[in-house]
């Protein structure tokens, strides 16, 4: 078994839709970024790839490459699961913390959990998504953007750990 840690942050961009964990959230500013800006997906990608020591989101999907402009981050996550599996590992569980003043993550966590579990190929009970505020402090507290932390457990393929 191996553990990986992922992190991502983006500034808000009101000209874009907000997508977190593969779920489009209405009436909220989107996130800047080369792809669709889904910071939850990006943090999970870094966590699973890091656990297997096979790089990160920027290595596999460089922001300077035009083919990834506007990309669906859940597709990038799906491709990352394939990279993970080619390296001989499979995801076991993922825990995500979204740090933002708004939108409130609690009412959205079930939809994000479902979508992430589908793409990762693990049971919903093996995915946790929760929100925290920054208590009004710093750039997150000022509403300039949000940050995401993710931890993933992976295991050798076929090990029977679940």
Image (cartoon, grey):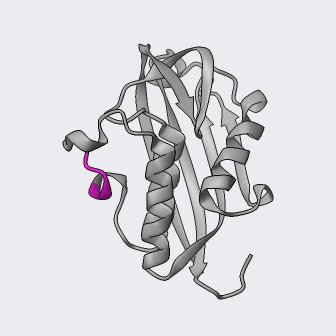
Q: In terms of depth relative to the viewer, which is nearer, 51 or 63?
A: 63
- Residue at point 41%, 30% (across, down): 10
- Is 52 magenta? The answer is no
- Residue at point 48%, 38% (across, down): 39
Q: In terms of depth relative to the viewer, which is nearer, 4 or 16?
A: 16
Residue 78: x percent and y percent? 50, 56
Task: Report the side of 16 relative to 127 (left or right).
Answer: left
- Residue at point 45%, 61% (across, down): 80
Relative to 134, residue 73 above or below? below
The answer, for residue 6, to whether it is visible in the render is no
Relative to 3, residue 132 above or below? above
The quarter of the rendered structure image containing the N terminus is bottom right
Relative to 24, residue 115 above or below? below
Residue 27: x percent and y percent? 61, 11
Instruction: Write down the region rendered in magenta.
Output: 59-63
- Secondary structure mostly seen in the magenta stretch: loop
Q: In terms of depth relative to the viewer, which is nearer, 94 or 36?
A: 36
Task: Report the side of 30 relative to 155 (left or right).
Answer: left
Tell me where residue 34 sits by quadrant: top left
The answer, for residue 92, to whether it is visible in the render is yes
Residue 2: x percent and y percent? 55, 76
- Residue at point 19%, 42% (across, down): 64
Task: Report the side of 32 relative to 23 (left or right).
Answer: left
The quarter of the rendered structure image containing the C terminus is bottom right
Residue 147: x percent and y percent? 50, 35
State the residue lying farthest toward the bottom. Answer: 159
Marks counted in the figure total: 0
Relative to 114, residue 143 above or below? above
Tell me where residue 101 sits by quadrant: top right
């Amino acid at each position: 078994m191996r553990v990986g840690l992922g992190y991502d942050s983006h500034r808000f961009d009101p000209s874009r839709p907000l997508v977190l964990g593969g779920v489009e959230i209405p009436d909220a500013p989107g996130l800047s970024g080369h792809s669709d800006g889904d910071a939850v997906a990006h943090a999970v990608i870094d966590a699973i790839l890091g656990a297997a020591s096979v790089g990160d989101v920027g290595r596999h999907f460089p922001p300077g490459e035009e083919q990834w402009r506007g990309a669906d981050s859940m597709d990038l996550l799906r491709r990352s699961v394939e990279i993970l599996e080619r390296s001989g590992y499979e995801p076991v569980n993922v825990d995500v913390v979204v740090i933002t003043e708004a939108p409130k993550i609690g009412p959205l966590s079930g939809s994000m959990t479902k979508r992430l579990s589908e793409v990762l190929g693990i049971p919903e009970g093996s995915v946790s998504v929760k929100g925290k505020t920054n208590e009004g402090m710093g750039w997150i507290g000022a509403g300039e953007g949000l940050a995401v932390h993710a931890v993933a457990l992976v295991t050798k393929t076929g090990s029977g750990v679940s």
